[in-house]
Structure formats: C-alpha cells, structure tokens
Amino acid sequence: MAEILRVEELTKYFNTKNGLLHAVDGVTFSVEEGKTLGIVGESGCGKSTLGRVILHLHERTSGKILFNGEDISEVNAQKLHALRKDMQIIFQDPYASLNPRMTVGNIIAEPLKNYKLTKSKEESEKKVREMMDIVGLADRTYNLYPHELDGGRRQRIGIARALILDPKLVVCDEPVSALDVSIQAQVLNLLMELQKDRGLTYLFITHNLSVVKHISDDITVMYLGQMVEKAESNEIFRHQYHPYTKALISAIPVPKYNAPDNQIILKGEITSPINVGKSCRFAARCPYAKENCFNTEPVLEEVTKDHFVKCHYVKEINGF
Ligand code: SF4
C-alpha cells in the first residue's frame, strides 16, 4: 500500500499569557492508504490539535505535512480549498457541528454546493439521498432538522457530509464519544464498512483505547503533545512497554464476573504543557521515574520490530 500521509517533527505551540503552550511537539508518523491510525491519549494531550493541524484548521508552528507525497505544510487559499475535498473531518459532537437551521438534506448537500460538483438541484438531491442510504439514514429524514433525530443519526449526518465529496483521508475526532454505548458499536461498524467499500484512510482520535482496538491498524499513544508509544494495534494490546500505555490499558474494564482489578492508578500532578523543559513529560506521574527522567528528555526508539517507545528505562522496566 502507498503511503498517503506523513508528518515529520510536527509542532503546534499556542501563545498564552503564561507562556508557550506545547500542544503538539515533534510528532512523526506515516499512514498507508486504506489504513487506520488510532491516536490515543487523555484529554489535553494534543491529539485533536494534531488532527486539526494536519487539516490546516490550525496552522502548524514547525514540521512537515506530506499528503500523497506532496509537501502541504504551507498552502495558499486556493490549494487549501482543493485539499479540503480530499481531507475531511468527522467531529465528536454531531449536534454542535450541524447547523440547527438547516435540514438534513441541505447539510449533506452543502459541500457539493461549495465545490460546484453538481449541475442542478435534482442532481444534488439524488446524490444526497444516495449518500443517506449508504450511511443508513432513512430517506424520510431528508427534510428533518438535526434536533428531530437522535445522537446516532446525527452522527450519520456528519459522516455523510464528510464523505459526500469522496475524500481520501478522514480525521475522525472522537466520533463516538458523545454517543450511547449501544450506538457506538453501530457507528464504528459503519465507519469500518465505509472504509472497506471506499478505500478510506482514517486518523481515528480517541481517549478510549478499547474503541480503537478493532478499527485501528496501528496505534500511537500521546502524552502532553508527544508520541510515547507506537505499534501495530494487536501488538500494543499484547505488549505495552511505556508506563503510561500500561496504565491506559489497565483501565479498560474487563467484562467478566470476578475479573481481577489490575488497574494502575496514576498518582502525581500532570506536568504543565506550558514552557516545558527537557525532561520526560510523564516523570511526575511515573512509578519508575528516576532523577535522570526529570532533566533529560527520552527519545522515541524502536524496542522490538516496528514497536517504538519513548522512555529512558524501557528495557529495565520490561525486563528485556
Ligand atoms: Fe517513566 Fe522515566 Fe520512562 Fe519517563 S523516562 S516513562 S519518567 S521511567
């Protein structure tokens, strides 16, 4: 499979009154066409900002973004307009991201209008109704408003709106987090079917590791703006080498009566992402931290084939 997206040393800093906030700091990865990269981490780790920087919804501070081999780190308005057709986003809160004054049909038709992709109202309506069918929205909802539908169907509108332009890459930013558990599985299955049928590439951003387990080919774990572990999905569920990933995986509930509670409870304060120094950003909460961790930043290194970890003591902790 060809590589469709590559980011190299991507950073995004925000100026705040207290100093520079390091939202995304030196992130490097690539994704092959038709695959899913799960990006996981707790709230505030920079995963959503990373997705938005790739889509140019935020401008990067430094680093490179390559899409289909082309450097798109800096683009003018015309190029950005063309790119947006190929790179779409599905938002977390379907209700907040849909215009409450527009009908379902008009919301899904809007991108077609913006890109002048249909010649008549009839052609646009036909395309919209076809897309509604593909994402499992009943035809009778065409003239309804978002508030008349439940969360799952609202998210299907968001998916239809993102896919109507036939994009290549879709950033799914916590697409099921706001939905009931029973509906989450339906929407995840829909996203997987659509990927198979249309060859889509996903960046799947979530705080919930159990959600990405089935949909992701590879998983990268982020902590305070940095990647701390990356591996193939099954591998990361079998072997977690970074202390933070171990804690994340231990927090996934086991649906079994009398299952032992092996959850690792992290203690300590989260380090401020403002004016960070040269240290391991996880040091204040890490049960294995040594003095060196507080004054030297570890590097992301390959510890087993295609399994990367950012920790000074990864070998010692895991008994390699
Ligand atoms: Fe923990 Fe030190 Fe490894 Fe950071 S570098 S994860 S503080 S052991």
Image (spheres, rainbow, N blue to C red):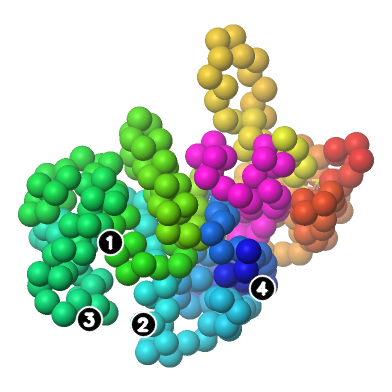
| Circle 3: residue type | Lys
Q: Circle 4: is it few (<14), some (14-19), or many (20+) Cα within 10 Å?
A: some
Q: What range is drawn magenta here?
A: 210-237
Do labels 2 and 3 touch, CB within 8 Å?
no
- Structural distance between the alpha carbons of marks 4 and 3: 34 Å
Q: Is residue 176 visible?
A: no
Badge 1 marks a residue whose secondary structure is helix
The residue to which callout 3 is attached is: 116
Instruction: Give the number of the mark in front: 2 or 4.
Output: 2
Do labels 1 and 3 touch, CB within 8 Å?
no
Q: In x, y percent, where is residue 62?
A: 61, 79
Q: Is residue 175 visible?
A: yes
- Structural distance between the alpha carbons of marks 1 and 3: 15 Å
221 within the magenta span: yes
- Structural distance between the alpha carbons of marks 1 and 2: 16 Å
The residue to which callout 4 is attached is: 8
The residue to which callout 2 is attached is: 81
Q: Earlier in the sequence, mark 4 or mark 1?
A: 4
| Circle 4: residue type | Glu
Q: Earlier in the sequence, mark 1 or mark 3?
A: 3
The residue to which callout 1 is attached is: 161
| Circle 1: residue type | Arg
Badge 3 marks a residue whose secondary structure is loop
Q: Earlier in the sequence, mark 4 or mark 3?
A: 4
| Circle 2: residue type | His
For residue 237, the mark is none
Badge 2 marks a residue whose secondary structure is helix
Q: Earlier in the sequence, mark 2 or mark 3?
A: 2
